[in-house]
Amino acid sequence: MTPNFSGSAALDWIRRLLGRLRREDRGPIVGSAVVDFDRDGLILLPSADTKLDYLAGFWRWVELLAADDYAGAIVSLHWPRETRWTPEGLKKQITTFFGGDRPWSVVVPNERLIGVLNDLAQFEPLDREGVGWFMAHIPLTTEPSNPKDDALP
């Protein structure tokens, strides 16, 4: 069954799915659970290379950012080489990207906006050389006290 991957319903579906999956590590960046974490905090994706799996991992990563856990967000990604990112540097890069007088904050938005961001996300599966990519917009607002507001800032 393929879910309608939009909004909080999608996040609830992911959480229910995780509850039914058995956790087993298969290496440094893969695992049997869609958005499980390994013992070092790395987000594990299944061996299947699908946009839905990457979206699930992306929203788990956004939850870390929205909780102001930039250190956890850095640790949760696989870096082929040592990274120079610091929690403070990552936060500054993300929250000042659009500029302006008011500070920006990462949020988990409402169901409709999650659906819009999911639709805009771009994905290219791994090719024969093992190269693929995923790109999605990080949801930001200047109104963090009202993250479910439907108006895009």
Image (tube, rainbow, N blue to C red):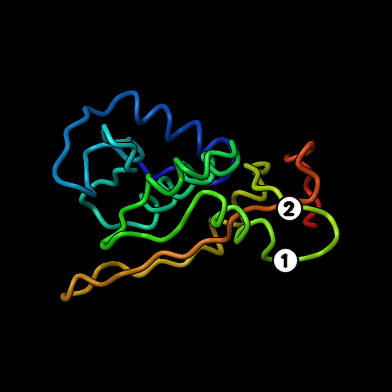
**Count of residue discs:** 2
Please name the amino acid that badge 2 sits on.
Answer: Trp
Indicate the position of residue 149 as horizontal and vertical percent values: 79, 43
Residue at 39%, 51% in the rendered image? 52
Q: Nearer the viewer, residue 13 or 151?
A: 151
**Crowd around label 1: few <14 · some 14–19 · many ≥20 (10 Å):** few
Residue at 57%, 60% in the rendered image? 137
Indicate the position of residue 151 as horizontal and vertical percent values: 81, 52
Would residue 86 appear left or right of 149 to someone viewing this image? left
Query: Which of the marked residues, 2 or 1, is nearer the chain's N terminus?
Result: 1
Q: Nearer the viewer, residue 117 or 71?
A: 71
Would residue 100 appear left or right of 59 to someone viewing this image? right
Q: Is residue 31 shown above or below 83?
A: above
**Crowd around label 2: few <14 · some 14–19 · many ≥20 (10 Å):** many
Q: Secondary structure at mark 2?
A: loop
Judged from this view, the residue extending furthest toward the right is 101
Which residue is disc 1 drawn over? 98
Q: Is residue 136 shown above or below 109?
A: below
Q: Where on the picture, by quarter, is residue 19?
A: top left
Indicate the position of residue 119 as horizontal and vertical percent values: 55, 60
Please name the amino acid that badge 1 sits on.
Answer: Phe
Which residue is disc 2 drawn over? 104
Q: Secondary structure at mark 1?
A: loop
- Placement of the N terminus among the 4 image quadrants: top left
Q: Are marks 2 and 1 in contact (CB under 8 Å)?
A: yes
Would residue 141 appear left or right of 93 to someone viewing this image? right
Residue at 35%, 70% in the rendered image? 124
Which circle marks residue 75 in the picture?
none
Indicate the position of residue 113 as horizontal and vertical percent values: 66, 50
CA separation in Å, label 2 and label 1: 8 Å
Q: Where on the picture, by quarter, is residue 24?
A: top left
- Placement of the C terminus among the 4 image quadrants: bottom right
